[in-house]
Amino acid sequence: MARQENVSSQVQSCSKNDPTETPIVKGPNMDSLGFLAMDSNVPGLSQVILQKLNMKSYDEYRSAMEGHKLSVGFGIRSYFEMFQKMEDTFKFCVECKKLPEALPNPKSLRRCKRCQNVYYCSTECQRANWPVHKKFCKKLKLVALDQLMEWLVFTGDIPFATTSWTKRIQEVRGWEDWFSMQENLEEKLSSILTGRYMNILWANTGKPKPDEAELAESVKRVTTDFVSRPATIGLGLQVFQINPCSPSRIRRVHVGMEVVMIGVDVVDGPIMRPPLVAFGPREKVYLSSYKGLYHDFWESQVETHQAARPDLIVGFHPGFHACPDLMESWLPTLLLLRDYKIPSLFTVYSEQELKCSLKISMELEMQITSCGANPFASLKPEQAYSNPNKPPVFCNSHYFTFCGLSGSPDEPDVGELEENKGEND
Ligand SMILES: [Zn+2]
Ligand SMILES: [Zn+2]
């Protein structure tokens, strides 16, 4: 799915003031903010998307995007119709921002032939836009391709079955190393390229099918997008030198690795399995979730000993730098992580976002322990949906880690060092 832009004025409140509301945890949802904010660039776009897809609300849209309702109740009778409707949501003139409805002839909206991504209402608009678009046209071609190929994640073709790691974690420094561990990679890719759903895809999109090599590269990019999150958790374990299998740890807990996903939208509907009340199987990763904000999780689960104090916190695109209002909900969590000295890793979409996040973190006196480009960043480019002529971004592109308060008293200060030096002399 394309990444949308965020606008601070559209932040939804936590709806504290409505006593009639069911006690479902609500909070800032970056995707929905972005979805609604699209209208600030292309007025009416979010409504067009919902209308085209026969949906009433953003929640329904999100749920469909996650593949829940594609077969039932989606109001779509064929794959052809599904791909057409998805494509319809991209139809607006990138130059003058007009939607098809606003044009004397809606069919005058034509797609850029090179990238198969953006639309123009006229050759005048295309010409006017070209100086900007030419910088992004090639990249937007990859975006458009990957957007279609992402459907194969919902059909189960991507990711291909991976095998046990054959290298030590220290030797896997990035995607090249990761792919080199995948046995019979060529065969696995080729079975996706010749699979049933790949054929359905290209028989129904109304776009020319790229050659095998381009498709294979796209499968790899979408795969990195899928694996980026668990691989980034691995990076966090590496950075903080946490060994989930260390003897002391196993003696302490006799369990596998517990991963708790925390957020207002990590689970759909009620939580089926409360987190951490029962230990997971040894040498396995035990996944559970908590629907709420992190500081609520801490109060209700960690402080009541229903969950262990975490060894590592990983936040994917928390986006607290993006708008001041979000700080209201993020601030308690950031201060909690800082004051309890929890090793934490956050990811961001770009170097620019990294700089902004670091600035805020330093203002909050968080001790930054490392930062930089993430070797396990997604390689799938994402465009700003309502304004495609911008450099694409990548999920988990950069990361930073922090632990405790900056200038923490654990570190020997300069005075102590000098004293020791004197003794040695
Ligand atoms: Zn136009
Ligand atoms: Zn183009």
Image (spheres, rainbow, N blue to C red):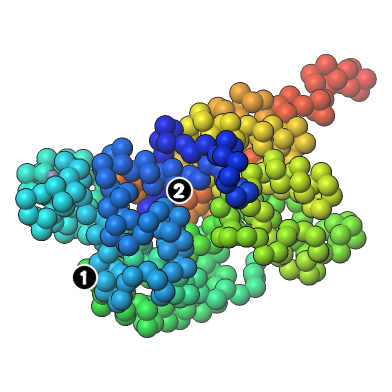
Q: Nearer the viewer, mark 1 or mark 2?
A: 2
Residue of label 1: 206
Q: Position of residue 31 (x, y in %)?
A: 45, 48
Residue type for callout 2: Asp
Q: Dividing the picture into quarters, in which one does residue 252 lie? A: bottom right
On screen, residue 146 versus residue 174, left or right, reads: left
Which one is in front, 66 or 355?
66
Q: Position of residue 80 (x, y in %)?
A: 26, 74
Q: Is residue 222 visible?
A: no
Label 2 crowd (10 A; few <14 / some 14-19 / many >=20): some
Q: Is residue 236 visible?
A: yes
Residue pictured at 37% horizontal, 69% vertical: 74
The quadrant of the image that shows the N terminus is bottom left
Q: Secondary structure at mark 2?
A: helix
Residue pictured at 47% horizontal, 78% vertical: 188
Residue pictured at 58% horizontal, 60% vertical: 269
In this view, the residue farthest toward the front is: 20
Q: Position of residue 17 (x, y in %)?
A: 57, 35
Q: Dividing the picture into quarters, in which one does residue 335 lie? A: top right
On screen, residue 149 versus residue 407, left or right, reads: left
From this view, report whether residue 299 is shown above or below residue 153.
above
Residue of label 2: 31
From this view, report whether residue 115 is shown above or below residue 422.
below
Q: Secondary structure at mark 1?
A: loop
Which one is in front, 390 or 334?
334
Residue type for callout 1: Gly
On screen, residue 330 versus residue 387, left or right, reads: right
Which one is in front, 94 or 369?
94
From this view, report whether residue 420 is shown above or below residue 331.
above
